[in-house]
Image (spheres, rainbow, N blue to C red):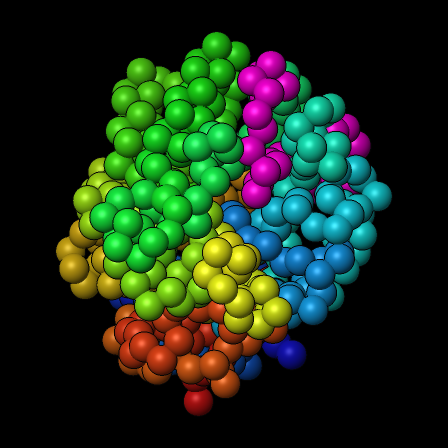
Amino acid sequence: MSASWCIKNGRIIDPVNNIDRIADLLVVDGRIKGVDQPTPPDVPEINAQGLWVVPGLIDMHVHLREPGQEYKEDILSGARAAAAGGFTGVACMPNTHPVNDCATVTAMIMDRAAAAAVRVYPVGAISLGSEGKQLAEYGEMRQAGIVAVSDDGRPVRDSQLMRRAMEYASDFGLPVISHSEEATLSAGVMHEGPVATRLGLKGIPAAAEAIMVYREIALAELTGARVHIAHVSTAMATELIRAAKGRGVRVSAETAPHYFTLTDEAVQDYDTNTKMNPPLRSAADREAIRRALADSTFDAIATDHAPHSILEKEVEFDLAANGIIGLETALPLTLALVRDRIIDERRLVELLSARPAAILGLSGGTLSAGAAADITVIDPDLQFVYTADQVVSKSRNSPFLGQTLQGRAVLTMVDGTIRHSLLA
């Protein structure tokens, strides 16, 4: 298959190079040659008229379930779902079985990822077994391929251990990704508020997130290290991050599409596909999340793609596993923010590509000449009904099934090789 292309007449949006205009993009031998360059003979053309041509999207927070729970998802199936959603790279969390807490597991993931449709960037565990007792060996995992450390899914309760993790990770240029949850406050199953009371479900207060966000900011300020706050869901946490950035603290943050799209009202039918951690919050929290995306309080949108089978989801709400799939719906849900004039097109590319690459120290997120040709072509107007039979992921746990969505990746290219295409 060709690794040289001329993508013609597309709207090229590249915030890193301050480009937003209709132009041609030339790819030669899997690398970006440049914008409006002379096209060599015999290079095939892709007509992108009416489409956006952007740096490949990067999801910095996914769960690929391999090793250990391949019946939910595996590296190859998750990568195919990522390509279908427009992502050319994904960072996979370490809460596998066994946990990715050593170079051996990291190397296995990297070996398996060599055959994947997109780039896979492993995240190593903060602590051995993610048990929060003893730090993992970051240096060896870094050499094996990790790009960050996190105990995602299991908050680090020991503040001294978290301080040491930040200091140790700094030695290897690794950001620490925090699952910010005060566990003694978060024993519920949905957001604490009037909806939970009406449904008779135990709630999780917004303070459970905010308390740990405050701790992480304080530790980052103390150590001078970098910390990244995962899947922010509340107005309280948002305000803490905004204030910390104003003081120059080295904190970055992400949110997920379900937090700027849905509220706890979505739980009213006890649909277990609306159960996640952190939970869907109030309408006021959702509005705060949207404002934070607009004013750069948040650096990235990540899916927190969490596949589960019917064994974990088709049970009572209290007993259901937390999490939803998101790789194939993130782009249309984010495009809705553009149509609502909450963010503009450039900001969308920053949130889904340029900033995730910068936070993780990746070479992607740009269409610079000489860069690998990791490219996403988007049709912002294409409408489709998101149905179970078209889901690429192994799992189907999404609250958006059956909905009409607008905007879709119509071509995903990695190293100049097409990994997904809806183009004729």
> On the rendered structure, is 85 left or right of 419?
left
**Image coordinates for residue 133, horizontal then vertical, percent:** 71, 24
The residue at the point 50 percent across, 24 percent down is 226
**Image coordinates for residue 72, horizontal then vertical, percent:** 64, 66
Residue that extends furthest to the top in the rendered view of this protein: 222
Q: Quadrant of residue 21?
A: bottom left
Frontmost residue, 292 versus 171: 292
The residue at the point 73 percent across, 24 percent down is 134
Residue that extends furthest to the bottom in the rendered view of this protein: 424
Magenta part of the chain: 136-163
Residue 103 vs 306, above or below: the answer is above
> On the rendered structure, is 165 left or right of 205?
right
Residue 299 vs 281, above or below: the answer is above
Q: Quadrant of the C terminus?
A: bottom left
Total labels: the figure holds 0
Frontmost residue, 158 versus 419: 158
Residue that extends furthest to the right in the rendered view of this protein: 104
The residue at the point 43 percent across, 57 percent down is 275
**Image coordinates for residue 234, horizontal then vertical, percent:** 31, 39
> On the rendered structure, is 324 left or right of 110?
left
**Image coordinates for residue 376, horizontal then vertical, percent:** 44, 65
Q: Is residue 142 magenta?
A: yes
Q: Quadrant of the N terminus?
A: bottom right
Q: Is residue 85 visible?
A: no
